[in-house]
Amino acid sequence: MHDHAGMRRINLKRVLVGEPLDTARLGETLLPKRLALPIFCSDPLSSVAYATEEILLILALGGVALLHLAWYAAAAIVFLMIVVVASYRQTCYAYPGGGGAYIVSSENLGQTAALTAASALLVDYVMTVAVSVVSGVDAITSAIPSLSDHGVWLSVGFVALLMLMNLRGVRESGRIFAIPTYGFVLVIYVMFAVAAVRLATGDTIRAESADLPITAEATFTGLGLVLLAMRAFASGCTALTGVEAISNGVPAFRKPKSRNAANTLAAMGVLSVTMFLGITVLAMVYEVHVAADPTELGLPPGTPMSTALAQIGRATFGSWHFLFYLLQAVTAGVLILAANTAFNGFPMLASILAKDRYAPRQLFNRGDRLVYSNGIVLLALVAVALIVAFDAQLTRLIQLYIIGVFVSFTLSQAGMVRHWRRELASRATPKADRIHIHRRLAINAVGATLTAVVLVIVLLTKFTHGAWLVVIAMPLLFFGMKGVRRHYDRVSAQVTVAPGVKPRKPSRHHVLVLVANVQAPTLKALGYAQALRPDTLTAVTVAADEEEGRRLREAWAEHDPGVPLKILHSPYREVVGPVLAHVQELAAAEGTDMLSVVIPEYVVGHWWEQPLHNQNALRLKARLLFMPGVAVIDVPYLLESARPAEPVQPAEPAR
């Protein structure tokens, strides 16, 4: 007795992602603020772990003498962060249904701006996954240098793990993400407290790299100095990545959605600003030196280098090694899980684009865990390809980052300015609300102006360092989405019918049954074909030689199925070609409205049995699919391995 394959083996999908959820339970996935913060804010919160280091890396090109410019770059970034957070709080209130840059631009600036914003966001989400995971792996290798040669595969493994966690559902993954996110925030503030106490009591704390010389690449003065400072500022702006995620995900919050989203955004802003400032202050006080190449610090080539945050933690905690390793553990955790911001944003945006017919329709559907499974898998695959292509090197990946961020920032805030102007122009707007609208208009106008200026700076300073790839990728995505929309529009025009049009029955229906022998699957297919009551019914087979044809003809006569048999001779032993030629010839000669090709197929119960059967059938179906006026019908025949188990009959009671 054989069990059905699905009944016998453990369903791997259910083990990995959990049991399916009913659509009616969608409301149960709404998030309280305590879970929304780690889910939507892990990216901007974790960005502070490497934003300061990126500033110092660029300024190191000019030697130790230029490191003091980090103070000015950090101050400008803090001001920009406050403005952007305030701007997106207005978006949360104006668009309670989700105010991503695509939606805001679409409603206020038109489809060209909307698709530009969408292409920027899609690129940014992919970069967020790659940069976050690779930076998290860097934190691990800073604590365990022996793993530094395995960065690529560690990064790929973490992306796969994140994909599985997100496939299980937003709420379930949020509980997992909360621990490292809150743990990171707590340990960072503990580090600040320890540093403050030690410095206040007269301790002199210096980073392990403080005495290492930095070899300047050149002497920067005048315009060169300005450009270097701008480039350092642009690199440090990675601290702003992910700020827009909450405004995109307002519908995921519990009621009152807009207020909860805005308050969560404000909390994120306070935490990000204070942590970024604190890390920058300690980096400057401890005289942290970093460089993309260890030889720039006088170290031997290939020497593993600690991140800036790792140096700060090791210097602050001193002999309290467990606190240093705890810092590295939570930093690695939050950096890797920061990619979750993208795993929430990318599938949601892809679903909206698919709904508007700018992306494949498969991206619109929710999976059985009420998440956009196809979008999650697609994001993971693209991020893995990027990590492998760039050899998991953060310095190279970071150059591609934040251009998409500031394109979406600028378009979103410009769209909000247009939105508030329309509100002011509307006579239906109460006078009491106009004061608040003017204030919100001013905030978004300042935000749009500042982010536009930063976008220009980022483009100027990063273009020749690899960002040109993003500048190419965004237009490709833009025109790709336009092409998808044109395709769907053409298909819609071709298949749309006028009201009242009735189904048209084919004037003649011919059926061919493909046979290879006279066995049970063949007889089942013939019986099905006869039930169709076609105008003509013919069985067709392919014989490599006369002897093979003679044997089949004799077997056919012995069983006498009541259907004429036509034998196609194929001296070159090809099956697919002769059948296709016969189908084309019959359609042309008979002038039929519809020709159905019936194919008997084995259904097997084990994966290893599948390659042993039906290969000609698969090839034929793939080719017949493109023939006009031809329908392909599979008639399955279940082998024993695929048949469900028979119920066990209870034993007869003894008499």
Image: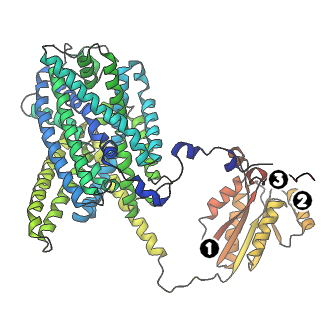
Residue carrying label 3: 650
Whether residue 304 can be seen here: no
Q: State which tag comes first along the sequence, 2 or 1.
A: 2
Mark 3 or mark 2, which is nearer to you? Answer: 3
Mark 1 or mark 3, which is nearer to you? Answer: 3
Residue kind at label 2, given as amino acid type:
Arg
Looking at this rendering, what residue extends furthest in the left direction?
222
Label 1: state its secondary structure. loop
Image x and y of residue 604, in percent: 72, 51
Residue carrying label 2: 551
Residue kind at label 1, given as amino acid type:
Gly
Image x and y of residue 503, in percent: 58, 82
Callout 1 crowding tier (Cα within 10 Å): few <14, some 14–19, many ≥20: some
Residue kind at label 3, given as amino acid type:
Pro
User: Which residue is rendered at x = 84% and y = 59% of the image?
Assistant: 519
Image x and y of residue 389, in percent: 40, 36
